[in-house]
Amino acid sequence: MSEDRQDQSPMVASAKERSEMIAVAAYYLAEHRGFSGGNATDDWLAAEQQIDRMLDAIRRQGISRLQFERTGLRNALRLWRPSHHHPTSPER
């Protein structure tokens, strides 16, 4: 039962999880531009800003860890931005 409660608790990323999210988001940014132009440092800094905004929006909206994990990082980056409200059906 404690595992169920933990899944429903608000999403709070550890430093390690945040760093892993930033690395994945930086990869997505490079992938989006076809891995041409730009550089890894710029991708990392942009990803860091995106992840921090997303995590802040998730925290303010009360999104649970389970909801976040079901959505996945790529969709979460699209859905939980400061200007968005609770998503109704995330992409798969």
Image (cartoon, rainbow, N blue to C red):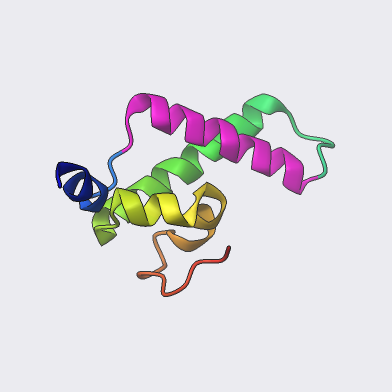
Residue 46: percent from left, percent from top: 57, 39
Q: Is residue 33 above or below residue 14?
A: below
Whether residue 52 is situated above or below residue 54 in the rendered picture: above
- Could you say where residue 22 lies in the image, as x and y percent from the top left? 52, 34
Please name the residue shown 32% across and 30% down the image: 14
Q: Pick the residue in front: 22 or 90.
A: 90
Front position in the image: 11 or 51: 11
For residue 29, side relative to residue 46 (left or right):
right
The mark total stands at: 0
Of 74 and 34, the residue lying toward us: 74
Residue plotted at (39% across, 60% down): 82
Q: Residue at x 66, y 36 (%)?
A: 27
Splitting the image into 4 quarters, where does residue 43 fall? Answer: top right
Residue span colored magenta:
13-33
Based on the displayed image, in which of its 4 quarters is residue 17 positioned? Answer: top left
Horizontally, is 20 left or right of 87 in the view?
right
